Amino acid sequence: MNGLLRRFDREKLVLGLAAPALALATAFAITSVIMLITDQNPLYAFGVMIDFGSKSDSQVWIINKAIPYYLSAVAVAIGFRMNLFNIGVDGQYRVAAFFAAVVGGALTLPGIIQIPVILLVAVVVGALWSGIAGYLKATRGVSEVITTIMLNAIAGALIGYFLKEGRLAQRTDNIRHTERLPEQAWFFEIPTQVQPIHGTIIIAAAVGIGYWFLLNRTRFGYDLRAVGQSESAAQASGVSVKRTVISAMLLSGAVAGLVGMPTLLNVSGNYGNDFPEGIGFIGIAIALLGRNHPIGMAFAALLWGFLERTGNQLEFEGYAQEIIGVMQGVIVLSVVIAYELVRRWGLKRQQRVVGEQLAAQARKNDSAEVSA
């Protein structure tokens, strides 16, 4: 039996690697066909991407870009693990970053105090904004997809209302922004030979480790996964479904609140009308691509950053601007399909192996009875 379990573990690892490999191969094949149809050379394009993406400055750029993408993916994945679709990460991180910037710009404290205060404000605001959808889901049965999409729009309107001169913003040229953070409130950076890596990568790593530990080593993680697999079975085993739904949405929103921190604390120093948007929706794609696994999502975030970085270079080479968007979309679709195909194949193979093992054991027992 132990040998059979070890065999299944090895096959599970192989299947886990086969799915993304199949998906990426399929995605690049489809993208190559599209390039050929539009009279563009796919081999040259991929060569440019690999060459440009391997440069030191590109590598640092990709890592820095992947930090908020990874945080966004983890926020989405927390909901995904219990079949909750938190589509509102985009609104949650923007409203959290805005109020964190307002509080940070109004304070003048030592950095060792002010930075945690800014992070705490972002986490609390993100959790509360997401908690609205969780409360409505648990108490009124309102779909979290609808409420989070609506809350995205409300978040944008709320920020737009306060981000005006005379309220909580000031104007510099055509940019309206909050008060600039004092120098001591900026997060540290890791120096390299080209440009620094944002120190907020430490926050992303800590979130990833915490996510893994919470889901796999705590009772709450077990309850969350149990509710995701079957609400009725979880409730029958004593799990409070309503409490778990609210807790999961609060936790998802808390992580979402950190998504804007790499930009606020390492790049802009304030929240303006040029603050990046759409990271929440990118997080959905990365969570799907990484299969909600902390390491898988890290590689997916780096891949996404790689495609964006090298896509800019392809434009200079005369390739269509939209080709990278096509590639990203095809990769996500290919991953979803590939994982399902590999999962079904693996399930059938396990059933066949178990059947063979049971048949062999039955023959062995029959032989022993005849001998006796």
Image (cartoon, helix red, strand yellow):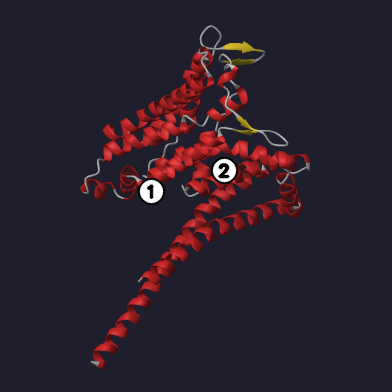
Please say if the residues under marks 1 and 2 sit with CB atoms less than 8 Å apart.
no
Q: Quadrant of residue 312?
A: top right
Q: Amino acid at mark 2?
A: Ala
Q: Secondary structure at mark 2?
A: helix
- Rendered location of residue 15, percent (x, y): 49, 62
Helix, strand or loop at label 1? It is: helix
Residue at 46% in and 32% down: 256
In terms of depth relative to the viewer, which is nearer, 353 or 315?
A: 353
Q: Going from the N terminus, do you reach mark 1 or mark 2 first?
A: 1
Can residue 21 be seen at all in this image of the molecule?
Answer: yes
Above or below, comparing residue 174 to residue 358 in the picture: above
User: Could you tell me residue 190's position as x and y percent?
Assistant: 63, 34
Q: Tag on residue 301?
A: 2
* Residue toward you, 327 or 252: 252
Residue 38 makes an appearance in the image: no
Left or right: residue 344 compared with residue 265: left
Residue at x-position 21% and y-position 45%: 238
Q: Mark 2 Cα within 10 Å, few/some/many (few <14, many 20+)?
A: many
